[in-house]
Amino acid sequence: MDIFEEADSPGRNAHEFTVSEISGAVKRAIEGEFGHVRVRGEIGRVSRPASGHLYFDLKDDRSVLAAISWKGQAARLSVQPEEGMEVVATGRLTTFPGQSKYQLIVEEIAPAGQGALMLMLEKRRKALAAEGLFDASRKKPLPFLPEVIGVVTSPSGAVIRDILHRLRDRFPRTVLIWPVAVQGEKSAPEVAAAIRGFNTLTPGGAIPRPDLLIVARGGGSLEDLWGFNEEIVVRAAAESAIPLISAVGHETDTTLIDHAADRRAPTPTAAAEMAVPVRLDLLSWVQEQGARLSRALSHRLDTRRQRLTDLGRALGRPEALVDPARQSLDQWSDRLGPALRAAATRKHAEFNGVAGRLHPGILAGHVARERRFLAERAGRLAPAVQRLARDAARDNQRRRADLVRLGERLAAAERIRLDGLAERLASLDRTRLTLGYTETLKRGFAVIRSEGGIVTTRDQAESAQAIEIEFQDGRLPVVSGTAAKPRRSKSDPPPDQGSLF
């Protein structure tokens, strides 16, 4: 009864949609009505997976809208979303049937007013300052007179002309220009790449490595200069091993690269003035220093000459210093001859006295004493030699006994080793016999062979001309022309023997 009542209930004739049909209809309705929209809200929950796509939320005080920027679109965004930013997102509304939700496909993001930009700029400045990128200890001194200057700017603007003109007026130097976009979505990555590119140049290579970098751009609004506030540019400037001058905007404009650079110039022209001194001023200074050096040298020589003259007056005449010594030398020369003759006479007399005391008896007594001394030494030497010989003999006997004991130990070790190997070989042979097929033959099995080898099937046995059966006590050859008749089973009926009647 309930079945018939349910069939007759109203509304059963309405069309039944599938889930995919409903999802497609909703998708077409939303995309047709909101094909291009601009949504203002606060960014929350930013996600950047490895795929390169960008996922984030747009929210206000009552609702949340899921937003997606695909990989190609996310790379072209002029402003990268950060949590807490208030922005205006431009895109199209669509649905995601897999989760039954609608979402915004974002094509462009713009800050919602000047106040939002300044708030985001201040937040980024504090975060980078907390990392120490703006510390004064990181600043490098500028070279006094760089040989090569690298300039990162637009090649077609008035900025590069002003820099080149000022360098030519003050002190001409070699200038390398790295052209970049100074405004728009390409500005930040190109400026960062230029700074890192100059730093990767090898000193002494085909392209000279700059001694100083200048990042320059003319004045503009906060949005125009925003590329120089990007984190990628600030980090590249802070990591630069080459001293860097930031000359972005006019004197009142301040960007984050100004804090990371080694020196900030109010204008591009001022950056050129910081880079090199005035050549004429240097020449004038060098000439002035040369003149001062000449005057100081002349004055020093005059002073030394006068001092030498004054000291010379206090010295005596050379003749007065040498004459007493010459006179003393003459006196000693006159006394030298008689002194030598007197000394020779005295030594000759002493020699004659000593020679008179030397006669054959005295020499014989001296020789006899020396012989007795040698004989005494020889008598003491023989026992010492005998003791050394006995000690050496005892040492040799002790070493010989040690060698005999070592030989006995080696012989015993060899016997033990051979006995162990023999026992192991016997054990392995017993294992071989146990695991061999001959032991299996003893348990009632047999091995059948033919010309082709071991017979394992009935077909092989029937096709063989001759076979050989191996038992445990020998082999039995069998010649088979035809297959043997099968044995009758006990359960088969007896054959018909006919009748005797």
Image (cartoon, rainbow, N blue to C red):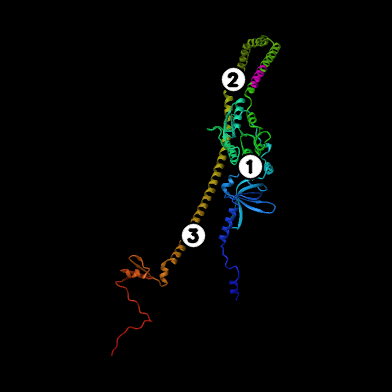
Residues tagged 1 and 2 counted as in contact (Cβ below 8 A): no
Give the Cα distance between marks 1 and 2. Answer: 113 Å
Mark 2 is surrounded, within 10 Å at the Cα level, by few (under 14), some (14 to 19) or many (20 or more) other residues, namely few
**First reached walking from the N terminus: tag 1 or tag 2:** 1
Q: Amino acid at mark 3?
A: Gly
Specify start and end residues of the magenta stretch as a single range: 284-295
Q: Quadrant of residue 196?
A: top right
User: Is the stretch drawn in magenta largely helix, strand or loop?
Assistant: helix
- Please name the residue that numbered disc 3 is placed on: 420
Q: Amino acid at mark 1?
A: Glu
Q: Quadrant of residue 252?
A: top right
Give the Cα distance between marks 3 and 2. Answer: 93 Å
Q: Quadrant of residue 430?
A: bottom left
- Please name the residue that numbered disc 2 is placed on: 355
Query: Disc 2 on helix, strand or loop?
Result: helix
Disc 1 versus disc 2: nearer the observer: 1
Q: Is residue 52 above or below residue 10?
A: above
| Residue 120 visible | no
Give the percent coordinates (x, y) of residue 32. Answer: 58, 53
- Please name the residue that numbered disc 1 is placed on: 231
Q: Is residue 445 above or below residue 138?
A: below
Give the percent coordinates (x, y) of residue 5. Answer: 60, 73
Viewer-side residue, 418 vs 457: 457
Q: Amino acid at mark 2?
A: Ala
